[in-house]
Image (cartoon, rainbow, N blue to C red):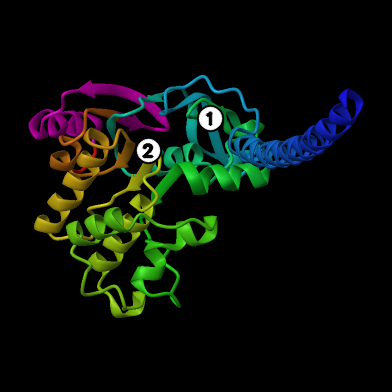
Amino acid sequence: MTKSTEKHAGTPGGATTADGGARTADTEARNVDAEARKGDAEARKGDAEARKGDAEARTGDGGARTERLTKVYGTGTTAVRALDEVTVTLPGGRFTAIMGPSGAGKSTLMHCVAGLDAPTSGRVFVGGVDLGALPDAKLTRMRRERVGFVFQAFNLLPTLTARDNILLPTTLAGTRPDGEWFDTVVRTLGLGERLGHRPSQLSGGQQQRVALARALITRPEIVFADEPTGNLDSHTGAEVLTLLRRSVDDLGQTVAMVTHDPAAAARADSVIFFADGRVVDVMDAPTPGLVLDRMRDLGGAA
């Protein structure tokens, strides 16, 4: 009886052990699959971070700066030195105005710092990244993702509507625009009734507003604005300056603006004055009167 009992008693226990082992194996297999999926996700995340960072050394605070930046157009006796060893800082999270007489090098500085034009010599850093060390593809991506630019000539695509021109940076980047921010920018710039119009159907002021909206739509780290209020009426110009001011104060963006208007420059935290391709003065806490006086000293029309 003892052997028989042991035999019959052992059979269910053996089956239970086998079933438990199978369940354990299934659980371990699922765990392995889960770990594999987690590993794949982490690998994709790592690839994305690598693409974003690209292992560039970053030493800045989100602003931009130059070291002995020089830009020469032409050669020999016809050479024009638009920038002459300019060392300047555009601090992160601040609004900087750039002023000076016509031909002083203001727009050239903006184009070089934004990575749109290559300097003859010297170095440019945006957010700590040395632009001269970037290959073309990475420089293009940096401009698209981290820089906004308002061109003096607008540079809108004639076949696109105002809406599509505004959203062009996100379209090229393959990202989804922030609908709430889009609505805020459009409302502030008074473009709500013009989104379906092409540039040829817009006034110069309306085209300027579309160009500004395009520069702001991705909330870039730094916005370069070349005469952003030059073609606007006083009311719209004031709203544009308020939006630029808000992007600094509320969003922590960096704004650099070329202007000939002392009142516009006074909305900035500081003003950099240019003459003959060089920085000749920097003014903190500017007022329209102080800016106007300094421009008169430089011989620039305000």
Q: Decide whether residue 241 is among the magenta residues.
A: no
Locate residue 126, reporting x and y percent. Answer: 49, 31
- x, y percent for residue 259: 26, 44
Q: CA distance from mark 2 to mark 1?
A: 19 Å
Q: Which circle's residue, 2 or 1, is located before the other in the chain?
A: 2
Residue wearing tag 2 = 104
Q: Which residue bears the numbered disc 1? A: 124
What residue is at 34 percent from the left and 70 percent from the top? 162
Place residue 11 in its image quadrant: top right
The reply to whether residue 106 is in sight is: no
State the residue at coordinates (17%, 42%).
264
Say whether residue 290 is magenta: yes
Bounds of the magenta segment: 273-299
Looking at the rendered structure, the secondary structure element under dot 2 is loop
Residue at the spot 25% in from the left edge and 74% down from the top edge: 194
Quadrant of image for the N terminus: top right
- Asked whether 238 or 164 is in front, the reply is 164
Picture quarter with the C terminus: top left
In the visual, does 58 lie left or right of 90? right
Q: Quadrant of residue 104?
A: top left
Tell me the kind of residue under disc 2: Ala
Local secondary structure at mark 1? strand
Is 216 situated above or below 211?
Answer: above
Give, as a three-letter code, the residue at label 1. Val
- The residue closer to the viewer here, 87 or 176, is 176
Q: Position of residue 103 (x, y in %)?
A: 38, 43
The one of 225 and 244 positioned closer to us in this rendering: 244
Residue 16 can be seen, yes or no: yes
Label annotation for residue 195 = none
Residue 208: where, in percent of width, then height? 29, 61
- Looking at the image, the residue that sits furthest to the top is 59
Specify whether 39 is left or right of 229. right
